[in-house]
Image: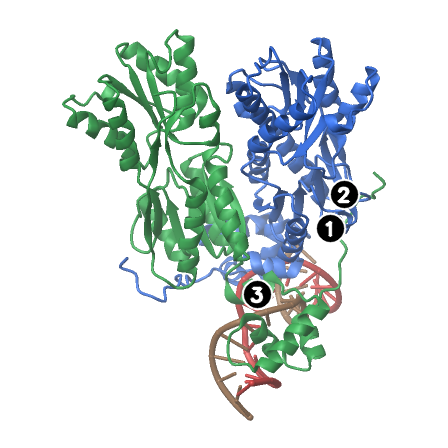
Chain colours: A blue, B green, C brown, D red
Amino acid sequence: MGDAEGWAPHPSVRVTIDDVARVAGVSRQTVSRAMNGKGEISAATRHRVLATIEELDYRPSAFARGMRTQRAGTLALILSDIANPFFPAVARGVFDAAAGRGLAVVVHNTDADADAEREATRSIVDSGAAGAIGFFEALDDESLVALGRRLPLVVADRRAPGEGVASVISDFAAGTRAAVEHLYAAGHTRLGMLDGVVGVDPVRRQEFLAVLTEHGHPQPADHVVTGPPTVTAGAAAVRELLARHPEVTAVFAFNDLLAIGAVRALREAGRRVPEDVAVVGYDDITMAALLDPPLTTVHTDKYELGRTLLDVLARRLDGHAAEHRLLSPRLVVRGSG
Amino acid sequence: MGDAEGWAPHPSVRVTIDDVARVAGVSRQTVSRAMNGKGEISAATRHRVLATIEELDYRPSAFARGMRTQRAGTLALILSDIANPFFPAVARGVFDAAAGRGLAVVVHNTDADADAEREATRSIVDSGAAGAIGFFEALDDESLVALGRRLPLVVADRRAPGEGVASVISDFAAGTRAAVEHLYAAGHTRLGMLDGVVGVDPVRRQEFLAVLTEHGHPQPADHVVTGPPTVTAGAAAVRELLARHPEVTAVFAFNDLLAIGAVRALREAGRRVPEDVAVVGYDDITMAALLDPPLTTVHTDKYELGRTLLDVLARRLDGHAAEHRLLSPRLVVRGSG
DNA sequence: CTGAAAGCGCTAACAT
DNA sequence: ATGTTAGCGCTTTCAG
């Protein structure tokens, strides 16, 4: 629209470190020192150089710097699906914390696909990212350890795959236990579970089965129906569950999306929620409290998870050892179960 | 955990273009040509070089390449709040389309704050991003035109700020008109609006007022209550609206989050939705259809918007002129109005 | 405390 | 069709 073909951005004369050096009357190493606070430098010259930088609006070239240091001021966030409401909440925490440290965040969407996760790690290494935060759901531990040798890595909601990789995990066992015990306390004895696709983190399912066993029920493996973590899949899964076990009066879901789908399918099948069948979700996405009935679910502080992930990564960037943090979820009883 | 202080990533011997050149028995320029498809090169040598690249698992240095070309294989996505469900849906479209072209996406979260938006543009220019897609809600047109001179830029849901900047816009006027006419058709004559914070895009409000005028109502400026685009603000705004104009029987909201807050506050205030007050939202976020009552809203294809944004940007990257595309929303009548 | 030299890996421009 | 030359802008030695 009014633009000629072959458009190219304006070249825009770049202010380089040499320009700053010349104007400030020092060598460029001194400018480098002033910027990065490395090496010995007198306060006076540092101030003068800094003022010159300001004056000339000098911005160091990320490329040139990266070429020397092999590290960019960028970090990577790997997640399976930004459209799943759990992730935006976490991402927001990561972004806010990253902005506070002047780091840009590259987001990689993998759909929990092993190839996509592998490709993301490739791209991250090639980009020279300063570090990475990953919700890996398909990649094997070895690949993660290998990645962790290339750059500071924090895995989220997955046990540390090995030496050198930090982790931040929500205590799924505790959250699951709270949810299932709540259902037992409410008098339910026939429980089913809607599990996410079997990935690397089987904790929720394991704990679900463990609590059932503790209550004297044999492990009813086919009381667990598996599917992708979506509303549609939740509806399908609960139908399957009811077909297998019509006597079920309570359903625990891997996440809220599955639970929401379950509630809808249950109602369509003529079952009242929670009177006929109780439903408990996991995550407490924003939507959960707004539904009718409002969803009983296990609340995790997703924003805090995001901030914590970045904090752990930043400490690693500063040369600290890999840390492992555990976040505590809590059951929020609302109307659905 | 078993990790010493002062950890640093393994150096990892880098395979360079010279290694490839040596093994393939050509000069490095030929390797460059084979990789980038630039310049003349015989099919035979290209194949040989490509095979060598594969064999050595050579990965070109993004830094070195950027240093020469002043362009990274990265693009920027500027948005106000990734936690607002509208944006993840769009982002998903952008990510998918970007991945198809081998581009990484850096996300900048601005909270619709002018300083944050300006800082994001700075960071983007400094990073040498190949291009940018922006939902700018606070920055002035001049700044956008200036940014557009530095790199290919596509603005989303905002009219093109000037020469050289591409745009993809949802037809807000048409969507708003459909929503308001629907309310009139349902017999409502006393309408109120919950507007987003006054930003650069006043189209929804203008069109709302225009349709009212066409129906012979004086422009009721104080029938429009403004707030941030959140559920909480929607509740507060509708309370304010009702305080000012208790006779209102229909509410049109700037987006679904405001509408959802309105529905809740309305019910808490003892008004039935839609019997006493009809509510129509905008966007059709995933949640909208799952609420009780399901939200009547103006549907926009957010994923398609994301893909289109990237498509327009990619064409610009390929040297085409700045395009301007208009996407058509459609009213979805559900239970709330 | 500061400067000079060297080179990171790549591609554009110019030979051949 | 391929090779050679020259640097992009920065930081890291190493001297002074």
* Residue at (49, 59) in percent of width and height: A23
For the residues marked 2 and 1, what is the alpha-carbon distance in whole angstroms?
9 Å
Toward the top, the furthest residue is B270
Q: Are marks 3 and 1 in contact (CB under 8 Å)?
A: no
Q: Is A325 left or right of B147, judged from the image as shown?
A: right
Structural distance between the alpha carbons of marks 2 and 3: 30 Å
Q: Quadrant of residue A6?
A: bottom left
Distance between the alpha carbons at the discs numbered 3 and 1: 23 Å
Callout 3 secondary element = helix
Q: Residue at x 45, y 49 (%)?
A: B307
Please provide percent x and percent y for residue A115. Answer: 66, 52
In percent of width and height, residue A320 lies at 76, 41
Q: Is residue B272 above or below residue B101?
A: above
Front in this rendered view, residue A168 or B144: A168
Pinpoint the chain carrying mark 3.
Answer: B
**Rendered residue at 48%/28% (across/down):** B287
Label 3 packing within 10 angstroms: few (<14), some (14-19), many (20+): some
Which quarter of the image is occupied by the C terminus of chain B? top left
How many marks the image carries: the answer is: 3
Q: Is residue B229 visible?
A: no
Tag 3: amino acid: Arg
Relative to B316, A279 lies left or right: right
Q: Which residue is mark 3?
A: B65
Residue B17 found in image quarter: bottom right
Residue on which the image places disc 2: A165
